[in-house]
Amino acid sequence: MPSLSEILDKLGTDTPTEKTASVQTDTANTLSHAVKAAVAAADTQTKTAGARPQATPTQDLTKIAQRLATAEQEALIKEAELFGAALCDGFVARMDKYNTAGSGVKVASADSFEKFAAANPELTKQAMELGYRETREKLAHAAQSAYQDGYVKTAEVIKTAAEHCAYKGYRNTLSLLSRVGQR
C-alpha cells in the first residue's frame, strides 16, 4: 500500500497532456484504495467500552462504613487536640495566678526545685508517677468514651442505611412482581 507522501507526490507530478487521463485514473484508483484500506483498518480497531458493573448494597454499605470510620478517626484526633489545648490553657492560667504579685504564693525557682528533688528523690519519683498515672487514666477514659460514642453513632448510621436499602429492595420487588402478574 502506498504511503500518503507517495500519493501526494503522484498528484503533484506534471505529465504530458496525452497521459493526463491515465495518470488521473491511476491516482484516483490509488487514492480510492488508500481510503478503503484506512477505513478497513479503522473498522478492525474499533474499541468498545466495557460495561461498568453495578455496585451492590454490600459494597455501598462498606464504602459508607469506611467513610464513617475515617470521619470518626478524624473526630478523635480533633478531640485529643482540643483536650491537649485545654490542659495547656489551664496550666498557663494557673501559672499566671502563681506569678502575680498579689497571690501570696511563693513560686519555687528551678534551682530550689532541683535541690528539693535531689534531697527527696523518692518523693519526687512518687509525685511524677502520680501525675503520670492520673493523666493516663483521664486520657484513657476520654478515649474510651469517644470510641464508644463513635461506635454507637456508626452502628446507627449503618443500621439506617441498611433499613433504607432493604425497604427500597422490597418496594422494587413488589413492583416487579406486580408487572409480572399483569402479563
Image (tube, rainbow, N blue to C red):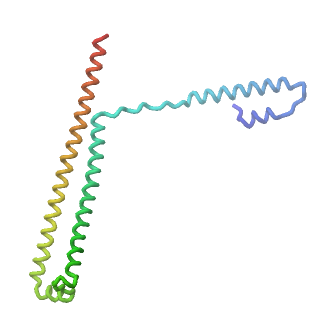
| Vertical side of 114 occupied by 171: above or below | above
- Picture residue at 20% right of the left edge, 89% below the top: 111
| Total tally of numbered discs in the picture | 0
- State the residue in front, 146 or 102: 102
| Vertical side of 130 occupied by 15: above or below | above
Residue 76 percent across, percent down from the top left: 24, 56
Residue sticking out furthest to the front: 102
Instruction: Residue 62: name its quadrant.
Output: top left
Residue 15 percent across, percent down from the top left: 87, 31
Residue 74 percent across, percent down from the top left: 28, 55
- State the residue in front, 136 or 35: 136
- Picture residue at 27% right of the left edge, 17% below the top: 177
Instruction: Residue 162: name its quadrant.
Output: top left
Instruction: Residue 107: name its quadrant.
Output: bottom left
| Vertical side of 23 occupied by 129: above or below | below
- Picture residue at 22% right of the left edge, 45% below the top: 154
* Quadrant in the picture for the C terminus: top left
* Quadrant in the picture for the N terminus: top right
Q: Is residue 104 left or right of residue 85?
A: left
Residue 24 percent across, percent down from the top left: 81, 26
- Picture residue at 19% right of the left edge, 48% below the top: 151
| Vertical side of 27 occupied by 131: above or below | below
- State the residue in front, 56 or 74: 74
Residue sticking out furthest to the top: 183
